Image (cartoon, helix red, strand yellow):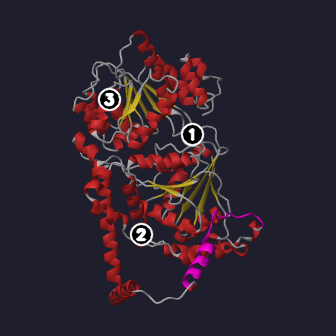
Amino acid sequence: MKNLRGTTFNSFNLDYRILKAVKLLGWKKPTLIQEKFIPLALQGKDIVSRARTGSGKTAAFSIPIIQKILEEKQSSGIQCIRAVVLAPSRELAKQLCDHINSLCQFLTPEIQCVDLVIAEHAVAQRFSLNSNPDIVVSTPSRLLAQLKQNNLSLRETLKYFVVDEADLVLSYGYESEITEIISYLPNNYQAFLTSATMNENVKLLKKLTLHNAVILKIEEAQLPAADQLTQYHISCSEDEKFVILCTLFKLKLIKGKTVIFVDTIDRCFKLKLFLNTFGITVVILNSELPLNSRCHIVQQFNSGLYDTIIASDEISVESPEDRKQSGTIIKLEKKESTASRGIDFNQISNVVNFDFPKTVEEYIHRVGRTARAWNQGTALSFSTKREAKFVSRVKKALTKQYEGEFLKPYRINMEELDGFRYRCLDALRAATTLAVKEARLKEIREEVLKSTKLKSYFVENPRDLQLIRHDRIFKRNRSLKHLKHVPEYIVPKSLRGVPVKTVQNDDSVEDDQKDHLKSNDRITKPSLLQRKRKAYRERCAAKRKADPLESFKSYVNILERKVLLLLLLLILLN
């Protein structure tokens, strides 16, 4: 990936304002894909490019498009839509728009780039198109909806058409949308397809959109070299995963910004509850939340507010409203995550596969979040006996690149972690199915209450607001607060003397003292209200004692209904 020919961005004869933006972004030299792609694009060639995640594909097509639009506007001052960039997901569309705008930061208002995904409603989308921006970024469904409503016309003005992550666009079931979008385009335009893999879907899309295209295959490894990316593997039981991960964090053996990948959203919350018990702060990238909330979480993580983020491959593609607007049905041949593909996590030091990826491609895209550009990175993958077959597939697929063993065994003596094991099992028992459902409900509830778009709804329906505000919230087990502290006797002998991670502003001792003082401060006769509450609690306890399982099931069902109702409220009104 490194530039060996001495080519610089100055070699491309770009506008000085683009070069100024490139310098500000800290790009010293073009990557291999940029070195090959940009000259061909400036010559007007249609291009299909295959390069791995993190190789700089986005800048490779963005820079020549911006340069050529500048040249066209100098000869013709007409303001119109000249470029359309399609992405498979809303997160990726937003990040593409942000990326292009960062390259245009010294060109505003001469070059305008608009993201149709940010505008949730059709009216807002139409308003964003009124100024005829030079570049429009969208998902296929959003763009097609606007074309059908005649809110934009591309037949006379479009010059550049880009499909980013082309393999995902078709695997997400967008073939019919792409075919229909092409019917709205002029006969002649320059087209780019970029993809991390070159499969049959990409070849099909190439036939639909390109003419006499140059196929640009960058002969580079699927993952960075072993001296840049260190990959470790731990084979253990399910419970041992939690014990080892907790130990690594508490003993500060994991340093720097970290992304933890799990299989499902429930696993995200279970792992978060578990780590929070030990005072380890993490944030979840929850696909149930609205796009703006998810992007805000990523921005907070990238800015350094959080050091650890838990992401799941259980990610939604588009909202039902998008599909309703374009009149299509969701067809997912293979659901891949925008967490492992597309979402731009900055300066990741570590990737932890808490659940081992089920495919080689998924492993490559997850691990590809770290060791990007010329930075160093570490990947740590856990696997159980059930996941051993997935490990074998990855080893078989990547052995040629590394010419030997690349998944180094991370050696841990579990006997030395017995002190942590007992504590972790206590924390795991507290992270029950009920606790996970409560945590999911709490996050959605908070999002509903923060939503500015739901304020008018709550004005008309104050009862709903009261119910959400005063709904029962799961209370953490105060008896586990001591787990935040790591006594020296449970630290492995080889690591004793190394300062362990402490919790800032830990007031667990003060809280316990305050509770003791409150209970012994003064003894007074219970009031009438207190006696009524006590009687009510005793009646409820008697019912639970009569049939505790039925009581638990009914509460879980209520929680599930609440989660579904709140999600529906977010989707319909946000």
Q: Nearer the viewer, residue 539 or 340?
A: 539
Q: Nearer the viewer, mark 3 or mark 2?
A: 2
Q: Which residues are magenta?
A: 497-519
Q: Check disc 1 and report its element: helix, strand or loop.
A: loop
Disc 1 residue type (three-letter): Ala
Q: Nearer the viewer, mark 1 or mark 3?
A: 3
Sooner in the amino-acid sequence: mark 3 or mark 2: 3
- Name the residue carrying label 3: 129
Q: Nearer the viewer, mark 1 or mark 2?
A: 2
The circle on residue 342 is none
Report x, y in % for residue 485. 65, 71
Sooner in the amino-acid sequence: mark 1 or mark 2: 1
Q: Tell me if residue 198 is in the magenta stretch.
A: no
Sooner in the amino-acid sequence: mark 1 or mark 3: 3
C-alpha gap between disc 1 and disc 3: 41 Å
Q: Tell me if residue 513 is in the magenta stretch.
A: yes
Q: Nearer the viewer, residue 36 or 465?
A: 465
Q: Nearer the viewer, residue 458 or 550?
A: 458
* Left/right of residue 539 with respect to residue 366 in the rendered view: left
Disc 3 residue type (three-letter): Leu
Q: Quadrant of residue 424?
A: bottom right
Report x, y in % for residue 82. 36, 22
- Name the residue carrying label 1: 221
* Left/right of residue 540 with respect to residue 106 in the rendered view: left
Q: Check disc 3 and report its element: helix, strand or loop.
A: helix
Q: Is residue 28 above or below residue 508?
A: above
Q: Residue furthest top?
A: 75
Asked if residue 85 can be seen in this view, the reply is no
* Left/right of residue 129 with respect to residue 214 in the rendered view: left
- Name the residue carrying label 2: 473
